[in-house]
Image (tube, helix red, strand yellow):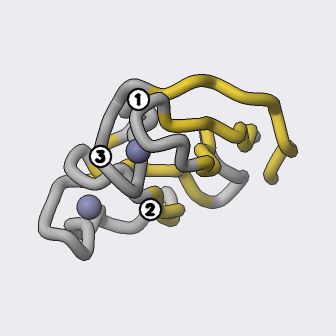
Amino acid sequence: MGSIYRYYCEKCDHPFQFEFGGGFRYETYTCTDCGQQKGILREASIPPCSCGGNLGRNHPPKCPKCGSSKVLEGRLMMHSD
Ligand SMILES: [Zn+2]
Ligand SMILES: [Zn+2]
């Protein structure tokens, strides 16, 4: 099961959610370019991100607004399933 955390960007103060893991039927992938997250069914093939970047698993969180990887971990918001 996944967990959703709230992060804050150190650079632009933008708050954003980041999910670790995934659900029973899907896994969470993160774009290595823009930091956008997508839940993809486990048996599905991995499409490219809408920005043209690659989606990867276990990629560290990145600010979706400015693209900085200097982020502060906030608190656990919820468990997803
Ligand atoms: Zn992207
Ligand atoms: Zn930022």
Which residue is situated farthest in the front direction here?
12
Which residue is situated farthest in the bottom direction here?
50
Q: Which residue is drawn at 39% across and 48% down?
A: 30
Nearer the observer, 53 or 64: 64
Q: Quadrant of residue 70?
A: top left
Nearer the observer, 50 or 22: 50
Q: What element carries label 1?
A: loop
Q: Which mark is residue 52?
A: none
Q: Mark 3 points at which residue?
A: 67
Q: Name the residue under label 2.
A: 43
Asked whether the viewer can see residue 2, the reply is no
- Of labels 2 and 1, earlier in sequence is 2
Relative image position of residue 59 (x, y in whole percent): 37, 33
Relative image position of residue 3 (x, y in whole percent): 74, 38
Q: Against 36, is 56 above or below?
A: above
Q: Which of marks 2 and 1 is in front?
A: 1
- CB at disc 2 and ligand 1 closer than 8 Å: no
Answer left or right for 69 relative to 32.
right
The residue type indicated by label 3 comes to: Gly
Which residue is situated farthest in the left direction here?
52
Nearer the observer, 62 or 45: 62
Relative image position of residue 35 (x, y in whole percent): 36, 50
Q: Mark 1 points at which residue?
A: 60
Q: In which quarter of the image is residue 75?
A: top right
The residue type indicated by label 1 comes to: Pro
Q: Residue at x 62, y 44 (%)?
A: 19
- CB at disc 3 and ligand 2 closer than 8 Å: yes
- Of labels 3 and 2, earlier in sequence is 2
